[in-house]
Amino acid sequence: MRYLAVHFLQGALLFLVVSLLSFTFLELAPGDFFQEMRLNPQISPNTVARLRAQYAIDRPLPVRYGHWLASALRGDLGFSFAYGSPVTPLLLVRARNTLLLTGTATLLAWAWALPLGAFCAARPGGWLDRACSMMTTTLLAIPELLLGLCFLLVGVRTGWFPAGGMVSARFEDFNRWQQVTDLLWHLVLPVVVLVLGSLPILLRHVRAALLEVLDSPFIRAAFGHGISRRRILFRHALPAAINPLVSLFGFSLGALLSGSLLAEVIMSWPGLGPLLLEAVLARDIYVVVGAVTFSTIFLVAGMALGDLLLFASDPRIRSEALI
Amino acid sequence: MRLTRAWTLPLVSLAVIHLVVLLAGFFSPYDPTIQDRTAPNCPPTRIHWISADGRLGWRPFVYGLAGNGFAEPMQAQPCAEDQQTPYPVHFLVRGASYNILGAMTSDRHWLGVPAPARIYLMGTDNYGRDVFSRLLYGGQISLFAGLLATVLSLTLGVLLGTLAGFYGGWSDAMIMRGVELFVALPWLYLLLALRAFLPLHTGPRQTFLLLIAVIGLLGWARPARLVRGVVLSTKERSHLLAARCFGASDLYLLRRHVLPETRSVVLTQAALLIPQYVLAEVTLSFLGLGVSEPVPSWGSMLATLQQYHVLVSDWWMFFPGLVLVLVFLSYSALSNAMQEDTAKAGIGSNAFS
């Protein structure tokens, strides 16, 4: 219980700090959404002043922050100037799209990394291990940005995959089954980019964690008892090595919202990333603050979940925490 | 640290890349902002050795581009070669004057062709600007933003890490809370948000410094934590206690005994951080939040690939990405070599410590 409380407090603190920092920087920055509007000769200075008063931008910083905090705690993250609508529903729709993309990618990346890392660790220096280490080194040196562009090129050149977007233009006319396949079809390229981007790091961690365990006496004893290699690897070694991987899994859960910005922008996936980018360029401040605090909360929650999983999976930690 | 074979290859390739980028004025045939509107989106200029009548010449030459007024103006393909007259490639030619590091002005270029013809080693972009020249000048922004941001980050990290580790107490507690906070932040989102609150329309020099400050200030946490660990373990060593008993001041202890111990951690962190920060600059420029046009950066050059026709037909616009991969490979090889070295050193020193 204390475990949860600490995480909750930390999350709340982070939320406060991030939002306060954003607001402070906002105060320091010259210009705002309506100042950019002032450049337009068709809009009179009076209108700009009235709009600023209407959205309360002309009030002092502590007042505005207080108001924002009070409404944020009630689940209302403010009003978007550019979209002319409340921020929260805007963010929720985009966050759902992002989660669809990153959830699939994270699941696939782990599904590949666990067995592949295990087989690599089983015979270090073998052909599979060498191939994997070469692949990870190469993939680590290719930034996600470049990977995205390359796969976009493949999609465009071959025409096998749709180039960007989440659904086809005629999505509304499709029946249920067609809609699902259309969505999956659009999902392929961005998911591949994200998987290739995160796989090398996961693979290295899985391999390192397993190598350490495979060195220990109880594994040798298991060999001595004549238990098959496969059973030792997956039934005995993997559960023993799961500890660092659980924390890593928590981290990848936390990065679900914020880890795919570039892939989303390049593949024009209507997620949180492109929304944030547009808002930054248009100085649509409440959207920016909302998106950043949203993803920060998610990050903290992911790590907390990772810790809880660790708590559930490792009796040593459980007994330590109880004492 | 001994310079073994594992060190030389990445070090040499990095040195070459940085030197060429630093001397961009000399190695680039043209000014990176000069536009040749008659020849946009042209592929790399072909360099010929065998002349039209089939003889092998001792000097390579190029043909003029149709767009540059060599053929009929109505001709549909401005990038086609006009094979009337060959233009020999000359080395150390005079051209547009340039400035190296603000210290030296010159107009000698590494290579060039006589006036009406132009040589585009990596083709041209949408505005007919020389991609090769832009690549070199863009490297000055991208590579050095990464380097300087790393210096800033490491300085802050060492300062705060030493403070936390050496003095302990409430400063330690404060700094470590800060570290936990900063490590937990979604850094790309925060980078974007920070950039959002800073002025968008500024001169290239201000933007460059701003990028360095933003990237560097966000990344101090990890090096600070590592440095703190090293300082904590060094503080308890007996030679330090002995020095303290001889009346050494804190400053002397730090300078003489503690900071030298952090050297290997700082160097390994640098090899990890520099490519990360180069990538951060490239990413921000790619998203249109970096140094503004017409000043080139690798990120803004790659950003043109988001246009459909460039992506599909202008393969030479991928060159900045290729150089980026080369830089990353070199840094990862370098950090591997460093880690192996420290691992070996660790085994060796165990016998005495």
Image (spheres, grey):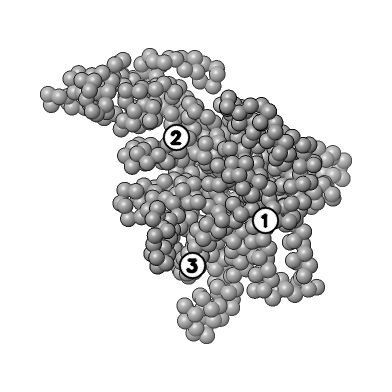
Asked whether disc 2 touches disc 3, contact meaning CB atoms under 8 Å apart, the reply is no
Position in image of residue B311 (x %, y %): 37, 41
Q: Earlier in the sequence, mark 1 or mark 3?
A: 3
Position in image of residue A7 (x %, y %): 74, 61
Q: Residue at x 77, y 62 (%)?
A: A6
Residue B246 position by quadrant: top right
Tag 2 residue: B301
Chain where mark 1 sits? A
Asked whether disc 2 touches disc 1, contact meaning CB atoms under 8 Å apart, the reply is no
Tag 3 residue: A111
Mark 2: amino acid: Met
Does any portion of residue A223 appear in the rendered image?
A: yes
Alpha-carbon span between mark 1 and mark 3: 26 Å
Q: Is residue B3 left or right of residue B168?
A: left
Position in image of residue A78 (x %, y %): 68, 48
Chain where mark 2 sits? B
| Foreground label between 1 and 3 | 1
Alpha-carbon span between mark 2 and mark 1: 34 Å
Mark 3: amino acid: Ala
Q: Which mark is residue A285?
A: none
Tag 1 residue: A297
Classify mark 2: helix, strand or loop.
helix
Does any portion of residue B130 appear in the rendered image?
A: no
The vertical placement of A202 against A32, above or below, is: below
